[in-house]
Image (cartoon, coloured by chain):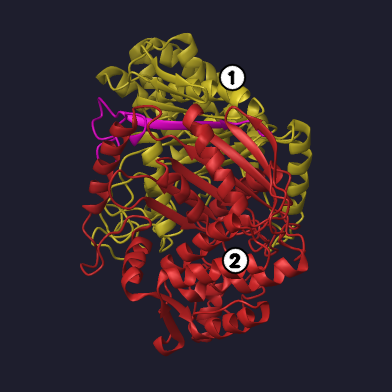
Chain colours: A yellow, B red
Amino acid sequence: MAYDIQDASLVEHYPLHTLSDFAARFLQALGATAEEAAIVSDGLMTASQWWHPGQGQGLEKLFRYHRRLQNGGIVPNAPMAWLKEGPAFALLDAAKGFGYVAAHRAMTRAIDLAGRSGIAMVGVCHSNHFGIAGYHALTAAKAGYIGWSSTNAAAEMAPWGSAKAVLGTNPWGIAIPRGEGHAIVLDMALTMSGKGMMRWYAREKRAMPENWALTPAGENTTDPMAAMQGPLLPIGDYKGYGLSLFTDALAGVMTGALFGLDVFQDDSNFDVGHMLIAIDPGAMLGAEAFSQRLEALLAQVKGAPPIDGARPVLLPGEVEFRRMQERSQSGIPVSRETVLELRRLAADIGISCAL
Amino acid sequence: MAYDIQDASLVEHYPLHTLSDFAARFLQALGATAEEAAIVSDGLMTASQWWHPGQGQGLEKLFRYHRRLQNGGIVPNAPMAWLKEGPAFALLDAAKGFGYVAAHRAMTRAIDLAGRSGIAMVGVCHSNHFGIAGYHALTAAKAGYIGWSSTNAAAEMAPWGSAKAVLGTNPWGIAIPRGEGHAIVLDMALTMSGKGMMRWYAREKRAMPENWALTPAGENTTDPMAAMQGPLLPIGDYKGYGLSLFTDALAGVMTGALFGLDVFQDDSNFDVGHMLIAIDPGAMLGAEAFSQRLEALLAQVKGAPPIDGARPVLLPGEVEFRRMQERSQSGIPVSRETVLELRRLAADIGISCAL
């Protein structure tokens, strides 16, 4: 990622279990069941271990959950229901519950179905923000399956040739299991970047790459402020636009969730849709042959000499895996601003805060 | 596409049936069965109707087929065999047959399986170049299914941070059926562009976009000649690299074909792998609800005002669909060079040539 770590004096470090325990108690105090709290907390911890606190996917998410659990946008212990099921698919009504929980249940079901069928897809409707896409793909990889996870999202990308946002960044997570070593995990939006990164460039008063976003009038710009109200640009120009449309067709249109301009608009009813696919990598040749052949391909990839000798070629997910290892020693960074706000909220809802 | 149409004096136009009939007879004279000739010819005609002759996917492909049918790289009437099958997957050994034929049979099987299971994947090993990815995805859409087709290909993309090509452009075709109107068809390589486009820029002595390819030393360049021996750049930087690796894991590693550096290297044994996935779009909500909801999304997309009033927002595949309609009136362009070479080859193999 292009982020520099923010000023060290503005960041505190905590052991994983301290944060994990706090997040789970926080959510339970707001009505989440123990199972829900454990799943959401695990997702937030994964984001905290993989990513920069400025990306807002770690403990910072608790602020939004707090607000939305109170305004009815997220329903704790939601009456989720399986609406339909076939040999290699299922449809889950998330009933406004936690997106992390709905997507986790959906991927778990997809894995189960793929174990019998080879591949399976599980759609989710009436859900919320499902967190980081790679987390749900990794759920499959941890079980020995290839995982593909996707969601629709608020309109921030314009159809190619327009400056009006109609489609979301519609992120994808892709994970491939490995017998030894960390799984391959690709976690990506279908846009070149996001508004969070643009805000960081704006704060740093730096020019952003010209292929990130347009002005509202559809002009190219390197000024993040000029593009803040404009659309994000897709990866690969018209290709990313097509991929985003495809994703909304699967995650939104197919499942019964909202889509396009309408999803993620009403804070008390986002009605997000997801699509989770699991594939048995050994279905055709057997698990062992797949594993050996995959390692041969990865050895070719890792054997490619780096352009810059100081920056070795990395596999997808390797940066995140290394950060996770480092942070198991050095602690997980949380911005001081977040710590102060969490202390305040903890006092409000009457739980202890070890932060 | 960024191509201009080449000098009109260098292009001849023919009705579809003339070209289609010629291609089929040409292939049959070289040993193809009537079924094989019909499938390959249909693929070549689709490319000829969608694309520019300079892209080399139309009748020009017959030169390569001619060479490879003679050197044993493509085996006509190949003894293709189903190696494995489960509720939602199958594996086809293409036995060095036509890639178009193997992928067509695989997608046809995937559609059949998806009709019962909701989603299905069919892998293909020991195959050849499968033509245009969108063609195979469209096979699914014509049957009312969402299609996703992919193949591995010769190493032309470097892992992110290296300049050594290890992975292919690994093209994807994605098609979504519509009740009325042309299907959505996205046909894309996972690189920003290809060597064919770079050669065109070189011939025209134009600077190419800087994000297309690197020099062999890993430097950015706008000089197509400086990058001709270097790697193509992926869409979305590291994202396209991850997508290409994922594609080879599915199409090559999982199926038993060659992969990475090894696929597409020996002209008499390319051993390409493909993966074809079909999805029943009505599995969850029913076909009619899917269709209505899709049209609502597409109306939002088409309703986005264009930046340039003269260039309306297009759906994926719309350019190609319009070209196909135009060419059904004006004829299909074939370069004069191709016509002359085909006449020579036709005389060689003893078939008549109406071109």
Q: Which residues are magenta?
A: A253-281
- Residues A116 and B31: in front is B31
Q: In the figure, residue A46 lies in which quadrant? A: top right
Res A192 seen here = yes
Q: Is residue A154 above or below residue A227?
A: above
Q: Which subunit holds the residue at mark 2?
A: B
Q: Are marks 1 and 2 in contact (CB under 8 Å)?
A: no
Amino acid identity at mark 2 = Leu
x, y percent for residue A27: 42, 16
**Callout 1: 10 Å neighbours few (<14), some, many (20+)?**
few
Q: Secondary structure at mark 2?
A: loop
Give the vertical position of A263 relative to A104 (above or below): below
Compared with residue A157, is residue A128 higher up or lower down, i.e. above or below?
Answer: above
Magenta region's main secondary structure?
loop
Q: Does residue A353 appear in this view?
A: no
Look at 71% across and 66% down and name the residue there.
B69
CA separation in Å, label 1 and label 2: 44 Å
Q: Chain of mark 1?
A: A
Residue to which mark 2 is pinned: B232
User: On the rendered structure, is B116 left or right of A256?
Assistant: right
Any magenta on residue A259? yes
Q: Nearer the viewer, residue A126 or A39?
A: A126
Residue A17 shows which numbered tag? 1
Q: Secondary structure at mark 1?
A: helix
Q: Residue at x 42, y 42 (%)?
A: B143
Rendered residue at 37%/49% (across/down): A199
Q: Residue A180 occupies which quadrant of the picture?
A: top right
Q: Nearer the viewer, residue B122 or A252?
A: B122
Query: Against A24, is B240 above or below?
Result: below
Residue B37, by quadrant, is: bottom right
Return the x and y of residue A196 as percentages of the image width and height: 39, 45
